Amino acid sequence: MNNTFYGKLVFELSKPGRKGYSLPKSEITGYTLNDIPSELRRVTKTILPEADELTVVRHYTNMSNNNFGVDTGFYPLGSCTMKYNPKLNEELCSLPGFNRHPSTPENFVQGSLKLYDEVQKFLSEITGLSRFTLNPYAGAHGELTGLFTIKEYHHQRGDFARTKIIVPNSAHGTNPASAAVAGFQIIQVNSKDNGRVDVEDLKPLLGPDIAGMMMTNPNTLGLFETEIPEIAQLIHECGGLMYYDGANLNPILGVCRPGDMGFDVCHVNLHKTFSTPHGGGGPGSGPVGVRKGLEHLLPNPQVVYNKNKDEYELQNDPKSLGNISLFLGNFAVIIRAYAYLLTMGKDNIPMAGKLSVLNANYIKESLKSHYQLPIEGLCKHEFVFDGLKTEYGGDHTEDYVKTLDVAKRLLDYGYHAPTVYFPLLFHEAMMIEPTESESKDTLDNFIAVMKKIAEEAKTEREMVKTAPHHTPIRRLDDVKAVKEPKFTFKML
Ligand SMILES: *Cc1c(COP(=O)(O)O)cnc(C)c1O
């Protein structure tokens, strides 16, 4: 592990005068760069590392080996959907025909616009909504777009009194954040012991100041919200709109549709459900769909097929909420989604949904003997444990083995940790999402390792509490990292 190159900055490998390149002579002047006259050369030294080619190659290769991704191992990060994304889609989205300037006139990009339109239509069919925009750049951006749609809907009716959005305490964190950014006041509705929205808690909140309600479904506990029909009826009766956070559409893909459940506005995350690797925070795409009657409110420009001309056009609707992004969003992500949808086809898409649910339930049922399962029953594509069971070190004494310790120990076994301490509903939350793309062998290995860690927590508590032991960097001091962050390397 500890070779000369490992864990060093390229500046630490630098030796004055070393270089890994040689420049050819200019075909025009016959000079090489080294012949640049001295009066034209800079006088101060550049702060660049000087290294030979092999050192540079090893440096970057070693660095890349420190990365963890779906391509290197199992990545059960709940609420993020770290599934396998076919390499074919990477090739397709870099086809030269798609490689164009975003301002290219419409008549030169008919193929791209057709693709855009077809993805919109596929999403409409999958979600049961009337029309989609693919302009938003991410899930949270889709939420913001959807909330502006709701606001615009009320304003265009002349109703300016609806300033509040209801958000359940089991919603994804971006929901209240987006509502606040969109200028709404957030009203929280609580969940029942079974993890679903409490309709009785909701009723007294309703009134003429409610613009709508956002629901994450499945919610952040991975549970399907069973009371949706009644909730949708209550919200509609009081004049509000229903918003569906469909970032995690995987479990209901091809099984049921937000539009049929009574939702008016919905966003989905192409980068979670429809291909595109998104580790490290990007790129994304958060298309927004609306029910019939709200189509004109979607952001400009809108891609529309003009039957008379047999052409795709960009239209700007004067009643639209306006522009939400430059051009047409993250187009390469949309191409990947198109490739994914066509490859899977109508017949196989429901399999993705069902497998993601089967895989999550398989892990949950296999591990609930060792980890605390706060809510029993069928989950969707993910679920939440509340730390280790009492008999496996999760006894809540002063030095009990925490979710963080389990997460760190998992790194020693070559797994990425699950999402930890989210959602906030449980003290030792550990959120696991296997996704539909993992084999039973992978799931079985993960289950075996999680059980092994639980056994270790029982018999070798100190070892687990000081994990990881086999990673390039051991356990970090989180508090110090926050209080004394160091973002730069001091070079001079
Ligand atoms: C990931 C996620 C979001 C946010 O999506 P981003 O693309 O990360 O902005 C919103 N809601 C839910 C339920 C999510 O899982």
Image (cartoon, grey):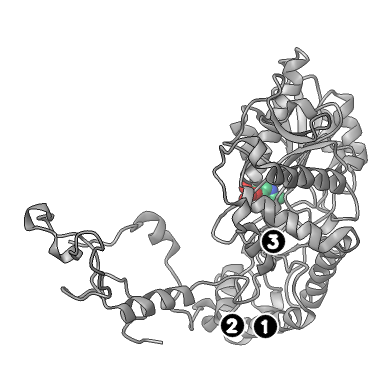
What residue type is disc 1 on?
Val
Left or right of 482? Residue 45 is: left
Amino acid type indicated by mark 3: Thr
Q: CA distance from mark 3 to mark 2?
A: 21 Å
Classify 10 Å Cα crowding around label 3: few (below 14), some (14-19), many (20 and above).
many
Query: Which label is found at residue 81?
Result: 3
For mark 2, what is the residue? 413
Tell me how far mark 2 sits from mark 1, CA to CA. 7 Å
Residue 186, numbered label: none
Is residue 7 at all visible to an observer of this figure?
Answer: no
Residue drawn at (41%, 87%) of the image: 1
Q: Amino acid at mark 2?
A: Tyr
Image quarter (top left, top right, bottom left or bottom right) of the C terminus: bottom left
Task: State the image coordinates of residue 341 (x, y, percent, origin top left).
Answer: 79, 57
Among numbered discs 2 and 1, the one appearing first in the sequence: 2
Label 1's element?
helix
Packing grade of label 1 (10 A; few <14, some 14-19, many >=20) is: some
Q: Position of residue 59 (x, y in %)?
A: 36, 76
